[in-house]
Image (cartoon, helix red, strand yellow):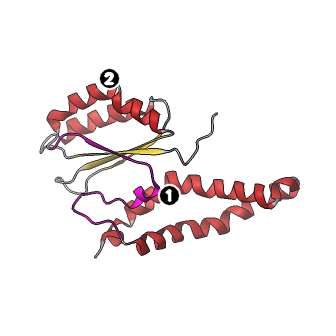
Amino acid sequence: MSSVDLNDVVTLVIQHKVRPGQRPGYEAWLKRAVAAAKEQSGHLGVNVIRPQSEEGPFTTVIRFAEAWQLNDWIASDRRRLLIEEVLPLLEDGDHPEVHADAEFWFTPPHPDVRQPPKWKQAVLTYLVICPLTMLIPPLWQPLWQRYPVLGGVVPSNMLVTLCIVVPVVYLIMPYVSRCCAGWLNAR
């Protein structure tokens, strides 16, 4: 299994506004499109954020290990054919956006919504990371006692940081930022 450099991870964000009455067809298409993306080299995961109202857009977030792998997917014939198939179901076409930074967690779901203030981003990030910094190190204690070389400052910090960064980037922050969207975007 090859390792993933978190500095190279890129995210493709696609928003689709589905025409009235076309949601069942779109959902069927989305299932096929997600399955196709999962087969692409470098694929790391997909999240679909369904609209809270009939008028809202579907937001699909696809992560790839490296930019060239994402570019291969965007330029692929398979994706092109999928997009051609779905265009009649959409009101405003297909507008993919590429994000390569962690600030993506706080990117508003609609262009008319402002990005949350930095202090709210910092508070939410702190509330996610702080408990992990208290929970993860004790889990490693038995291993460090058995293999003292792993308990040294550098190896132990590398292991703890890895066990915090990966779940925060891929699982926790995307979920928490969606759950707290009301607070983040409140004026």
Q: Is disc 2 placed on a helix, strand or loop?
A: helix
Residue topped by disc 2: 77
Residue 73 picture quarter: top left
Q: Is residue 124 above or below residue 31?
A: below
Q: Which residues are magenta?
A: 92-116
Residue 148 coordinates in the image, percent (x, y): 87, 56
Give the mark, 2 or 1, whose residue is nearer the N terminus. 2
Mark 2 or 1: the one toward you: 2
Residue at 35% in and 33% down: 74
Residue at 25% in and 53% down: 51
Residue 44 coordinates in the image, percent (x, y): 49, 40
Residue 101 coordinates in the image, percent (x, y): 45, 53
Q: Is residue 7 above or below residue 83?
A: below
Q: Amino acid at mark 1?
A: Ile
Q: Is residue 176 left or right of residue 16?
A: right
Q: Is disc 1 placed on a helix, strand or loop?
A: helix
Residue at 47% in and 59% down: 173
Is 65 in front, or is 182?
A: 65
Q: Amino acid at mark 2?
A: Asp
Is 102 in front, or is 171?
A: 102
Quadrant for the N terminus, please.
Answer: top right
Residue 69 coordinates in the image, percent (x, y): 46, 33
Q: Is residue 181 magenta?
A: no
